[in-house]
Image (spheres, helix red, strand yellow):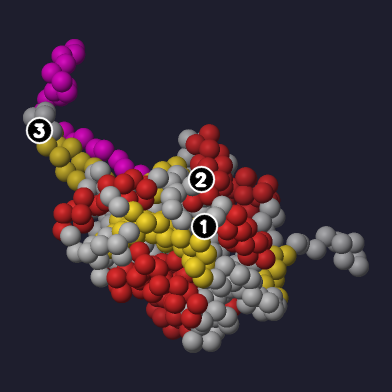
Amino acid sequence: MNGTGALLPRQLVSVNPASGHELGRVAVTSAEEAADQVAVSAAAFRRWREVPAPRRGLLVRAIADALRRDKARLAALVSAEVGKIRSEAEGEIQEMIDMADYAVGLSRQLHGLTLPSERPGHRLLEQWHPLGAVLVITAFNFPAAVWAWNAFVAAVCGDTVVWKPSSKAPLTAQAISQLVEAVVSERLAEVDGRGVFATVYSDEPATLDGLVGDGRLPLVSFTGSSATGRRVAVAVARRLGRSLLECSGNNAMIVDETADLELAAQALFFGAMGTAGQRCTSTRRAFVHRAVLPALEARLAAACKAAPVGDPTDPATLVGPLIDEAARQRFLAAVAAREAAGETRLAGGRALPGPGHFVTPALFRAEAMAPRHREEVFGPLLTLFPYDDFAAAIAAHNDVPQGLSGALFTRDLGRAERFLSAAGADTGLANVNTGTSGAEIGAAFGGEKDTGGGREAGSDSWKAYMRRQTNVINDGAALPLAQGVRFSL
Ligand code: UN1
């Protein structure tokens, strides 16, 4: 209550995880306002779906231009709000730009099919129509790019987008939303994009429940933990909506005895410690052939000990802070559990004093997988396991509930093929001689099992944002029925 007795809206407080300082606040969208926004987005959809797709692409192209102009400012904000080092924060805005460029091209390629009919004078078609207003829920670790994966594709497909960003990164979402709003109003004469993009800011479960249960949102795209993703999927399924899930990862790399160890070490170091280990594609487990384990272990331990941890705006820093104190405590608990279980700590795993939620990159060696290795840890932690048999290494690689990304370093062609075969990695992304994280947008991104099965970004991921319609056209003078059925007057 303020002095006049009126209720002030609650605010999301954005805190710089490196300094602990408040960066700013954003008013929480109430459940009623969120429902009103859905109504506005659903109404805007009815207009937007009739704008020709290549014209819709023009709006996304203008947004890409604005992002290019504003890249440095937005990257600085991502860095301040979620603690990414400068190069990764710039990479995140670049990922948005790449996605926008991709979507512009896609706006002229939303192709259907023609199929032969069994009936004389008939033709079968398949075409793709816009779906509706789409809810996009994103996480703190990619506070900008994951929205772009969804929003730009959805927009060229003729959908409108309601964004529910992470409550830990509201300022990034606000800056992007303002940039988009400015472009939409500048371009009104060219293309009417009013109501195509909207944002609701909330950390209130009732608002989230209201949105995911709202039948006016035919698709819910969710990025976050498997636990929350499961709840979202159930709520959306109850109303027979569609969900597109990008949930947890717990990714592994296999390094065999023929591998280029220097490249493998670099890929493991970036995969495990980059973004302070807070990617869903981060590498948490490495199965290393026993013959090369000592050499790789020494190389990685040295890298972890030398890794500059600290202020993400310092160009020398490689490992910034964890997002908040709760995240740091979870990381330290995972380290403690590994020590208690008798794993060998080769480097790091300690909290650093001072403001900010910093930890040193943790490297462990364990003899074999245990239940603790099947849970996702969101922080800079890598466990090395020795292996003797390649088939057993693939089995261990797959022996987790999650199924996002996997990697193999080898010079053996047969093993590379085996890893990518039906009996190989069970992950949505599987790489040879490159790491688990850092996917390009041109291909489909997503994973299996508890990761949720969704695919976003490139390839044919756009089909998730459209409805398929099968058409039969008869240009003949008769009405033959399929399967030879006779039924005439
Ligand atoms: C995520 O961590 O949520 O492949 C997405 C990558 C990035 C996307 C990660 N392009 O690591």
Residue 18 showing in the rendered view: yes
Amino acid under disc 1: Glu
Residue 488, magenta (yes or no): yes
Pointer 1 local density, CA inside 10 Å: few below 14, some 14–19, many at least 20: some
Q: CA distance from mark 2 to mark 1?
A: 13 Å
Q: Nearer the viewer, residue 299 or 30?
A: 299
Q: Could you tell me residue 104's position as x and y percent?
A: 32, 67
Mark 3 or mark 2, earlier in chain? 3
Q: Which residues are magenta?
A: 462-489
Mark 2 or mark 1, earlier in chain? 1
Q: Is residue 426 left or right of residue 14?
A: left
Residue 371 - label:
2
Amino acid under disc 2: Pro
Q: Is residue 403 left or right of residue 208?
A: left
Q: Is residue 354 left or right of residue 313?
A: right
* Residue found 12% across the figure and 25% down from its top: 478
Q: Secondary structure at mark 2?
A: helix
Residue at mark 3: 121
Residue at mark 1: 343
Residue 475, quarter of picture: top left
